[in-house]
Amino acid sequence: MSALTRSLPLILALALAAPAMAQETTAPAAPEAGTAAPAEAPAAAPAAADGVGEPYVAETFGAWQLRCIRTDDGSDPCQLYQLLKEKDSDKPISEISLVALADGGEAVAGATIITPLETLLTQQLNITVDSGKTKRYPFTFCTEVGCVARVGFTKEDIDGFKKGNVATISVVPVADPSRTVDVDISLKGFTAGFEAVTKANAPKN
């Protein structure tokens, strides 16, 4: 089994944990004025011991976050993550999660990219760095959160990300196959972030 096949279920799990992580920052609503508090509030559900299994943001590198899942032995698996928003809007529309691969294969990094459910899958996922050559990748499956492409990036691809400013994802919407929807991936901080995720997931001696 290749490192890409082994790693992608992990980064997909981390990516799907993103909405839960966002919810953790939301403050609870205050009780309405004049409303008495319950005499005895029910006890909160116990958390996992030492937060084991909980996702967290370890570091931020420009537009990227190093997101990890806490383990009981401290060998927390991590991914490089970016939430992608619609151009000229603050509306989240896609996301990318990426890890380095270390088995010496053609792919040196594996990524999970999630796009909206209304994506025309037969037109595939297109990625262009700055004004370079566009590469196409097939979608793997769709879930309730969106359509998923599992992508293997070569050393040439990663070098392009390190040197570039913006990578643009283009997909075709089912409702209007005559046009494309373009979403930018900021490459600010990518080099430092990729080094960090490589180090975070390196085998511990």
Image (cartoon, helix red, strand yellow):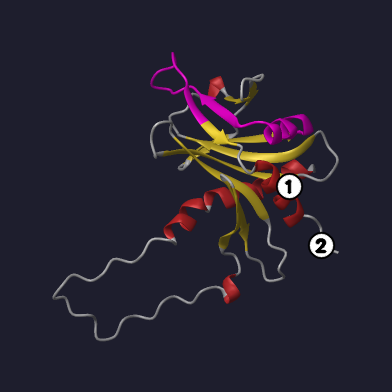
Name the residue: 60% across, 30% down.
167
| Quadrant housing residue 67 | bottom right
Q: Secondary structure at mark 2?
A: loop
**Quarter of the image where the C terminus is located:** bottom right
Name the residue: 34% across, 80% down.
42
Name the residue: 49% across, 57% down.
21
Question: Callout 2, which amino acid?
Answer: Lys
Residue 204, labelled with which disc? 2
Taking the image as shown, residue 28 lies to the left or right of residue 185, namely left
In the rendered structure, which segment of residues is drawn in magenta?
154-183
Q: Is label 1 or label 2 in front?
A: 2
Residue under label 1: 6
Q: Residues within 10 Å of mark 1 (few under 14, many from 20)?
A: few
With respect to residue 170, does 204 lie above or below?
below
Q: Secondary structure at mark 1?
A: helix
Taking the image as shown, residue 39 lies to the left or right of residue 21, namely left
Marks 1/2: CA–CA distance: 18 Å
Most distant residue in the left direction: 34
Name the residue: 66% across, 55% down.
78
Question: Callout 1, which amino acid?
Answer: Arg
Q: Nearer the viewer, residue 76 or 192?
A: 192
Where's residue 118, x and y in %?
Answer: 43, 29
Most distant residue in the bottom direction: 39
| Quadrant housing residue 3 | top right
Q: Residues within 10 Å of mark 2 (few under 14, many from 20)?
A: few
